[in-house]
Image (cartoon, rainbow, N blue to C red):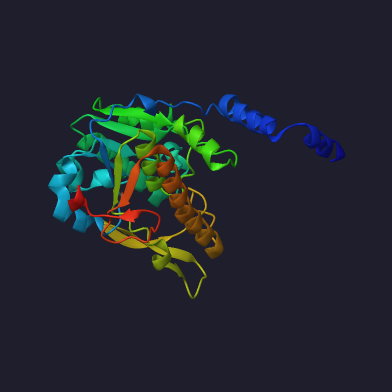
Amino acid sequence: MQVKRFIKLFIPPIVFKIRNFLYNVWEKKSFVSTISKIDKRDDTLIVLGNGPSLTQTLEMYKKKIKLHDFIVVSHFCETAYYSELQPKYYLFADPSFFGDLDTYADWHKEKIGRCITSLVNNTKWDINLIVPNIAYGSKFIAKVSENSMIHPYYYNPVDMCHYEDDEKFKLWDKNLLGVPSQTCLNTCLWLGIFLRYKEVFLVGADTNWIELLHVDQKTNEVYTIDSHFYGQKRLTLYKNKEGTVPVKLYEELVSNAEAFKLYWELKAYADYAGVKVFNASEYSLIDAFERKRISDL
């Protein structure tokens, strides 16, 4: 213990940061990043969250959204809107998509399997699939690559250390570090800024988890009303993809707080990069971005 303290007195902190970085690159093989090769066709990116308010947005602005680059997330391919709108980007950030489905709880296995099948069967146009580099060589990539219209691009999600904003933003700009992905929308916003779209509009980002969080009054089970524009259901919250370790209420609240905090960090990153980010959701608890409407495009 005394030796470690002595070493830290004489070795600058940056040395430890470099050591951690190299460990993650070579030992964890986590530095594959190809998203800088993406060609954008527009100056505006629209991020479609899966919140309930997206229904209203699509009813009013569907034609306008199709005029711009836009990105969808998670289970969007299971809706009729997917084939109708034909998005340019599709992001999967949840690492459970890239694991061994045979080890998952039945409900989780069925949910992910259904999504993969829908993506493969319903994609009839060229689409850029944005996935973390842990997906590289996975069964997920092998399956979706059966459809030649799906083009995977990888990003580095590793967030190792705490940095001052300017230093962190430079690393985000090179994807040497990744944005913490409490939600897939965090990653979508980072991608829009990374690719230097002039404007990024966020819709369907209700982000109202705290309004939907409950504790069962008999069992103390923490659950949510999993609410999306394509439906809702009660969902017990677990820490692990196997569905065996229940979440504690304080843990879920801390996670929610971190996600909201990260939106403010992304706002600072957007300011640093000269990108305008607007929250154009019909309803949203995200307070970090200036409010606008898609009609302002």
Residue at the right extreme of this rendering: 2
Q: Residue at x 40, y 61 (%)?
A: 209
Residue at the bottom extreme of this rendering: 217
Q: Residue at x 51, y 71 (%)?
A: 219
User: Where's residue 100, x and y in %?
Assistant: 45, 37
User: Which image quadrant for residue 130?
Assistant: top left
Q: Residue at x 16, y 51 (%)?
A: 61
Residue at the left extreme of this rendering: 63
Total numbered labels: 0
Q: Is residue 244 toward the left or the right of residue 94 in the image?
A: right
User: Where's residue 168, x and y in %?
Assistant: 53, 38
Asked whether 255 or 141 is in front, the reply is: 255
Q: Residue at x 53, y 59 (%)?
A: 254
User: Which image quadrant for residue 187?
Assistant: top left
Q: Is residue 132 above or below residue 218?
A: above
User: Where's residue 171, x and y in %?
Assistant: 51, 33
User: Where's residue 108, x and y in %?
Assistant: 40, 49
Q: Is residue 165 above or below residue 261?
A: above
Quadrant in the picture for the N terminus: top right
Asked whether 93 or 206 is in front, the reply is: 206
Q: Is residue 261 toward the left or the right of residue 58 in the image?
A: right
Asked whether 207 or 226 is in front, the reply is: 207
